[in-house]
């Protein structure tokens, strides 16, 4: 009779908890209690309590055993750890905080995005036409919403809302739309750079025109190869809602009135006197210009620069710190890590800019212009005035010891207008091959932003992911196979067997 009672109690001890678990799972699935769920929970609770009471003597005797006490301690510690983890997750849910540990900060909003979204004056909506958000765009847009009440995000199922999808001309290939009033833009993808470029375009009332001088061997906007073209720069400007065009000062005999910023990028031949005069008159009327002049060239702009208190050095800057090797260049590629206090470079501290084959640029007093040195090289550099047989060495009294200034920004009041000028002793830093290196692209774009008085766009822009793929030969792959899939598992099993044998 006693054996039957014990068997019944064992069955009750199993059925009771199972009924409790079944009732709870059914409740979480259906999200309603219902009579069946309530019955399962009540019956399960009663049976569990009965099992505890019926087995109280055995439980009490078992609790006196050393193994039971150790098991109880382990259970308590496990429950405590689970409780701590659960509490930490609860705090994380209530107080959301992400830490981006990637080298390029791929999962943190860039300085440009924060500035543009925070300064929104108009309502902007990003609409994703998709049945589900497989790429997790909604989570990304939450950070945008936290920056401005003028920003919103909506996901629309194009099959259920066919009319809205038709209104915005949504398609499987173009299912992302940025809307501001009656203006729309279609980002090419869901990257931060594409979305913020679209926001810039729909919120700008008009686009400003950047005019590039041609006719003297300057960098070409149409060139997209990895050489010295400015095709990437052209794309960057258009992404931020600027218009670009090339002009020939000989043909026009003047800077066109619709040019908001004039750019002279790396002329290889001298300008005609009337061309230099046209640039000077343009600045005197309150124009804005960026002059990028490489070493070993004479653009014949001395009179224009003298009026602004700026002088180009007849030299080539040499940097023997060895940093140039990181971009495949030698001492002829000076590095700048020291920046002046100016809107163009205000966020550059702690970053680098490279200048393949640069000349020095100096500011001189007495011109009436307000000038700022934009960037300087390290002390391991100098301005070389004479290069013989490809060899360079510092000559005291002849060469200028670093730090060397590589660029100057200046402003001057001309009548009722403020003229602005940026002069940099290199044009290659913004060429296709180097514009993506460190902060080179930001330096060029920030200069355009400052010259065109779009200071709200001056920023550190989003970076693309670095290619960190590892190329392995067949021998490397075989070695990796034997180490990770054979030797390491065997070593683990062997160490375990050895410990067991010693304790046997």
Image (cartoon, rainbow, N blue to C red):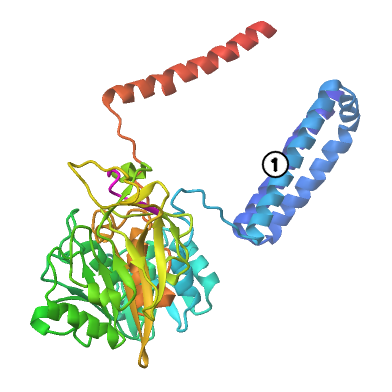
Range of residues picked out in magenta: 329-336
Query: Is residue 4 shown to the viewer in this render?
Result: no
Q: Quadrant of residue 431?
A: bottom left
**For numbered disc 1, what is the local secondary structure?**
helix
Asked if residue 330 is among those painted magenta in the image, a careful observer would answer yes
Judged by its main secondary structure, the magenta piece is: loop
Please name the residue shown 39% across and 19% down the image. Answer: 482
- Above or below residue 360? Residue 122 is below
- Residue 50 screen position, x and y as percent: 85, 40
Q: Quadrant of residue 405?
A: bottom left
Please name the residue shown 81% across and 26% down the image. Answer: 70
- Residue 134 screen position, x and y as percent: 41, 58
Q: Is residue 418 left or right of residue 118?
A: left
At label 1, counting other C-alpha atoms closer than 10 Å, the crowd grade (few under 14, some 14-19, many 20 or more) is some
- Above or below residue 352? Residue 158 is below
Considering the image in quadrants, where does the N terminus appear? Answer: top right
Mark 1 lies on residue: 18
Considering the image in quadrants, where does the C terminus appear? Answer: top right
Q: Is residue 48 left or right of residue 342?
A: right
Asked if residue 182 is among those painted magenta in the image, a careful observer would answer no
- Residue 230 screen position, x and y as percent: 21, 63
Point out the residue furthest to the bottom here. 416
Residue in the foreground of this view, choosing between 193 and 14? 193
Q: Is residue 312 left or right of residue 253?
A: right
- Above or below residue 382? Residue 469 is above
Please name the residue shown 11% across and 75% down the image. Answer: 272
């Amino acid at each position: 009779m006693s054996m039957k009672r014990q068997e019944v109690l064992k069955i009750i001890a199993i059925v009771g908890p199972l009924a409790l678990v079944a009732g709870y799972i059914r409740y979480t699935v259906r999200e309603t209690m219902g009579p069946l769920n309530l019955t399962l929970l009540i019956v399960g609770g009663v049976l569990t309590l009965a099992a505890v009471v019926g087995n109280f003597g055995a439980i009490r005797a078992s609790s006196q055993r050393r193994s039971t006490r150790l098991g109880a301690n382990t259970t308590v510690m496990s429950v405590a750890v689970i409780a701590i983890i659960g509490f930490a997750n609860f705090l994380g849910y209530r107080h959301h905080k992400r830490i981006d540990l990637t080298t390029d900060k791929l999962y943190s909003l860039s300085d440009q995005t924060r500035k543009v979204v925070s300064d929104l004056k108009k309502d902007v909506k990003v609409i994703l036409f998709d049945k589900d958000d497989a790429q997790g765009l909604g989570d990304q847009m939450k950070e945008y919403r936290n920056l401005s009440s003028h920003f919103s995000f909506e996901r629309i199922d194009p099959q259920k809302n066919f009319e809205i999808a038709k209104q915005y001309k949504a398609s499987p290939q173009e299912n992302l739309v940025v809307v501001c009033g009656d203006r729309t833009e279609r980002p090419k993808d869901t990257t931060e750079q594409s979305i913020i470029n679209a926001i810039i375009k729909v919120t700008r009332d008009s686009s400003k025109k950047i005019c590039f001088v041609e006719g003297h061997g300057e960098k070409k906007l149409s060139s997209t190869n990895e050489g010295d073209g400015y095709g990437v720069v052209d794309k960057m400007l258009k992404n931020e809602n600027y218009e670009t065009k090339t002009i020939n000062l000989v043909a026009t005999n003047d800077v066109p009135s619709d040019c908001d910023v004039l750019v002279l990028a790396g002329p290889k031949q001298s300008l005609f006197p009337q061309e230099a005069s046209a640039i000077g008159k343009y600045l005197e009327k309150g124009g804005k210009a960026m002059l990028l002049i490489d070493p070993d060239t004479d653009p014949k702009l001395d009179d224009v620069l003298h009026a602004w208190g700026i002088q180009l050095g007849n030299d080539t800057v040499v940097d023997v710190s060895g940093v140039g090797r990181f971009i495949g260049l030698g001492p002829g590629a000076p590095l700048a890590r020291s920046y002046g206090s100016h809107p163009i470079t205000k966020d550059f501290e702690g970053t680098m800019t490279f200048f393949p084959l640069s000349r020095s640029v100096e500011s001189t007093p007495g011109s009436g212009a307000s000038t700022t040195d934009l960037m300087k090289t390290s002390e391991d550099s100098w301005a070389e005035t004479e290069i013989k047989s490809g060899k360079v060495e510092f000559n005291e009294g002849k060469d200028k010891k670093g730090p060397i200034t590589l660029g100057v920004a200046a402003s001057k009041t001309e009548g009722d207008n403020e003229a602005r000028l940026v002069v940099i002793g290199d044009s290659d830093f913004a060429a296709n091959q180097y514009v993506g290196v460190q902060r080179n692209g930001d330096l060029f774009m920030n200069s355009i932003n400052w010259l065109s008085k779009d200071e709200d766009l001056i920023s550190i822009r989003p970076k693309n992911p670095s290619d960190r793929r590892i190329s392995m030969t067949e021998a490397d792959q075989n070695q990796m196979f034997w180490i990770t899939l054979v030797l390491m598992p065997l070593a683990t099993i062997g160490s375990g067997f050895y410990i067991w044998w010693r304790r046997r």
